[in-house]
Image (spheres, rainbow, N blue to C red):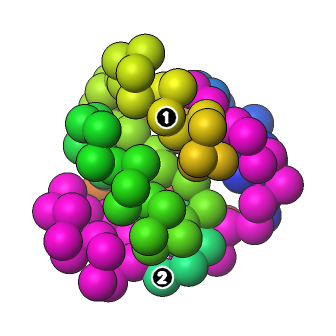
Amino acid sequence: MTVESLAEEFGFKVLTMPSPEREICGAYIGDLLSWVMGKAESDNLWITIMSNLNIVAVATLADVSSVLLCEGVLLDDEVLALAESKGVNVLATDYSAYEVAKIISGAV
């Protein structure tokens, strides 16, 4: 499943999508950035509530296909611009991480 098709199918809000055709293979849920860097796999969907500037660096280092912000978390303009410039897809939803996991289970 691509990032674009995931957003469309499940109604996730697109905050930035420079790579809509990026494939999603699995997911990683976590908010501790050092854990995400060490445990998320390439092409995972990273599900988090973290919204600071460091998520762009972590997403790039872990080579995740997209960041999905939960619980209504949004990014400020500076973080959005950095994500766009670094090619990081960022989606958002009001669902909790648990609800997202249930919803996308079996799809990615």
Instruction: Please state if 39 lies on the left or on the right of 83 as rendered.
Output: left
Residue plotted at (44% across, 70% down): 61
The crowding category of the residue bearing disc 1, from other C-alpha atoms within 10 Å (few below 14, some 14 to 19, many at least 20), is some
Instruction: Please state if 15 lies on the left or on the right of 22 as rendered.
Output: left
Task: Report the mark closest to the observer, 2 or 1.
Answer: 1
Q: Which residue is mark 2?
A: 41
Residue plotted at (28% across, 48% down): 54
Q: Residue furthest right?
A: 21
Q: Which residue is mark 1?
A: 82
Residue 43 higher or lower than 5, as above or below: below
Residue 91 higher or lower than 29, as above or below: above
Q: Position of residue 1 (x, y in %)?
A: 77, 64
Q: Nearer the viewer, residue 21 or 82?
A: 82
Q: Position of residue 49 (x, y in %)?
A: 25, 42
Q: In this orientation, does residue 9 appear?
A: no
Q: Position of residue 8 (x, y in %)?
A: 75, 36
Q: Are marks 2 and 1 in contact (CB under 8 Å)?
A: no
Magenta highlight on residue 18: yes
Residue 98 higher or lower than 72, as above or below: below
Q: Position of residue 103 (x, y in %)?
A: 51, 53
Instruction: Please state if 65 lies on the left or on the right of 6 as rendered.
Output: left
Callout 2, which amino acid? Glu
| Image quadrant where residue 85 sits | top right
Residue 101 higher or lower than 76, as above or below: below
Residue plotted at (73% across, 40% down): 18
Callout 1, which amino acid? Leu
Task: Find the magenta span and give its range.
Answer: 15-40
Q: Nearer the viewer, residue 76 or 91?
A: 76
